[in-house]
Amino acid sequence: SGSPSSEDLPAFLGLWQHVKRLQAGTPLLLRTVNNGQEDLQICTFSISQDMKMLRWQDQEGSGETHEAPVGDIVDIQEDINNSSAPPGGDEEDGHHALIIKSRRGGNEVTMYLICASPEDLGSWRDGLRFLVKSSGPASAPAPVRAGGSCAPRVKAVPTSPSNSSAA
């Protein structure tokens, strides 16, 4: 059961196109909330060539690159409640966002990714769900489920020695 059946082939090829797009990288808006303080950063998100790491690089400021194992992602949802929209934003503006929850140690981490288009949203939603399902142990239930708790292990990867200044 390692290869898709002929009936599943079109769906598999569609998912593979999403994965290739994720590997190429996409600029997305990352919304984070730390101690009640909201921050929006333009980051280029991508999946590593071995499809095991989610990476994002800050396109402003430090240029710092972060990583989280795809296997640590426990939930991927479309943000239908508009909770990741910037304050004061027009809800009619075509909001395309994902909520990604992962496990970091014993903690849950939530990332809000705001996509520029419905195509980006579809690629990231479907591509990540496929990779998360593929990365889990065969005996475990599918890790992508509605209402589950989740968080990724996030590791900062310095890109230059000059980005270690304290805020």
Image (spheres, rainbow, N blue to C red):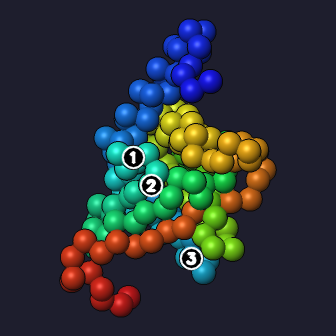
Q: Quadrant of the C terminus?
A: bottom left
Q: Secondary structure at mark 2?
A: strand
Residue 139 locus on image (x, y percent): 74, 45
Q: Does 72 sit above or below residue 132?
A: below
Residue located at (21% from left, 76% from top): 160
Residue 44 locus on image (x, y percent): 34, 53
Can you name the residue that lies furthest to the top here? 6
Residue 148 locus on image (x, y percent): 76, 53
Foreground of the two, 94 or 106:
106
Mark 3 against mark 1, which lies toward the viewer? Answer: 1
Residue 84 locus on image (x, y percent): 58, 55
Q: Which residue is mark 3?
A: 34
Q: Which residue is mark 1?
A: 50
Residue type highlighted by circle 2: Met
Q: Earlier in the sequence, mark 3 or mark 1?
A: 3
Count of numbered labels shown in the rendering: 3
Could you say which quadrant of the image residue 8 lies in?
A: top right
Is disc 2 surrounded by few (<14), some (14 to 19) or many (20+) residues within 10 Å? some
Q: Which residue is mark 2?
A: 53
